[in-house]
Image (cartoon, rainbow, N blue to C red):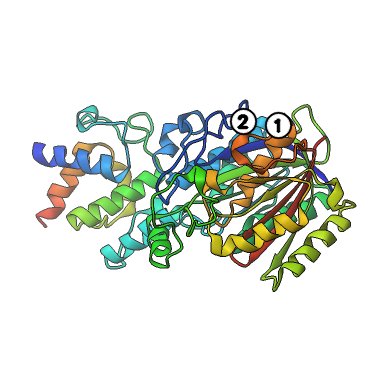
Amino acid sequence: MSELIATLKVQIIEQLNLQHLKPEDIGDDQPLFVEGLGLDSIDALELIVLLQQKYGIKLANPQDGPQVFKTVRSIADYITAHKSK
Amino acid sequence: MALYINGIGCISPQHTFYNSVFLPEVKEYTTNRMACVDADYSKFFDSGSIRRMGRLMKYGTASGMIALKDAGIDVPGAISTGTALGLPEISQKFLRSLIEVNETIVSPTAFIQSTHNTVSSNIALLCGCHAHNNTFSHKGFSFESALTDAGLLAKENVDNILVGAYDEVSDYKYAVMKKTNELRKEPCSSLDVYGEKSHGIIAGEGAAFFVLAKEKSENTYGSFVGNKAFYKPESMEEIKNHILSFLKENNSSLADIDVVITGISGAMEADSVRIALNKSLFSTQTIVAYKHLCGVYMTSSAFAFWLASKMMKAQQIPDTVILENRNRSPKNILLYNSHKHNHSLMLFKAC
């Protein structure tokens, strides 16, 4: 899991062009949206693209988005759960 | 209808983003490609939006915001822009990713910025302008079309019109220009491009914006009297006729003109007619050139518009742009630009 979280941080920085951040600046349980990293709705779309392109996972129910993309750990959990399916 | 130029903003391959100075140092290029000198964009955009913007999006939008700030205007009465190629770098990024993922799911960020009107829309969003917002894309007539639009809007009582142009030289465009032998082959200084043996051009880019208003302000640079465009003239005589009739239409004559800004590019094949014209028609005017500063691109006449504005306000002509000096003060300025078959004229008057 920790390896996946580390990889995800690198991929998020690259996908969202967060050039001012390093992977270690993003906490595993830090909220990604609003008060956390300050991501917005376009970033949510970018994260959906990331999931599909890098992990082949489609977000089946868009209403799950806020929960799935809450933190890096929650994304990693979602990937782990859906990769094994 | 003459309009006052009350604010300007320009980001180009030179240091032009500070309006308090006028070409403080000239940047010399020895390659056949010029790139914009970037401003500190963090002063214009928050970190959240800046990370999504492509290069042209940044310098195009910032130029517009500089012009508005310079004019002391929060929200313009209308926005009218010209761009020949839109935002090719980011559009190509989007198209490439579409191919890479086999037309499945692609990044929305590049898609959002891949239309020609992205810059003018972004300016409107930033300043909260819900008024007329048009982007013209007509090759070498793009900026000229935006100016015509601004003139028509002014006649309909729209004031403080933000008008501008922007283009970039993308890697792909540069490769095409190289392949079609348009570019200068031998390395040479950009400050020495108008020699008799020069062949090929230097590719350039830039963005320039202006606030055109009906009333003069404390910041007024001068007035923009009018413009005219004509396509593929068949002879030098035809060009002469266009120039003389344009001046007459604007209640002016050749004798009134102090400075002529010529759009010669450094490629002798294309410049020979313009040089002959300068000799025969403009024998008493100071002749100024500008494409050695910004390079050749389809909306470079906006850079010339910026140059005219600065010269009128400063009442000074920088040495670096003078081709023929007849010691005339820049009071009445005629711009004659051409890009391939697109020819255009603009007339300016100092206040």
- For marks 2 and 1 on the same chain, the one whose residue lies earlier in the sequence: 2
Q: Position of residue A30 (x, y in %)?
A: 26, 30
Quadrant occupied by the C terminus of chain B: top right
Q: CA distance from mark 2 to mark 1?
A: 9 Å
Residue A19 location, x and y as percent? 31, 35
Asked if residue B299 lies left or right of residue A77, the reply is right
Q: Amino acid at mark 1?
A: Gln
Mark linked to residue A59: none
Residue found at x 54% / y 55%: B196
Q: Look at 37% across and 55% down and name the residue there.
A: B171
Q: Is residue A13 left or right of residue B218?
A: left
Farthest residue toward the bottom? Answer: B234
In the picture, the disc for residue B316 is 1
**Pointer 1 chain:** B
Query: Callout 1: helix, strand or loop?
Result: loop
Q: Which residue is mark 2?
A: B22
Q: Mark 1: give few (<14), some (14-19) or many (20+) Cα within 10 Å.
A: some
Q: Quadrant of residue B232?
A: bottom right
Can I make out residue B210 in this image? no
Residue A78, compared with residue A58, is above or below; it is: above
Of badges 2 and 1, the one in the foreground is 1
How far from the left and from the top, in percent, is residue B226?
A: 79, 52
Marks 2,1: beta carbons within 8 A: yes
Q: Residue at x 56, y 45 (%)?
A: B207
Q: Are marks 2 and 1 on the same chain?
A: yes
Q: Amino acid at mark 2?
A: Phe
Callout 2 crowding tier (Cα within 10 Å): few <14, some 14–19, many ≥20? some
- Answer left or right for B247 relative to B96: right
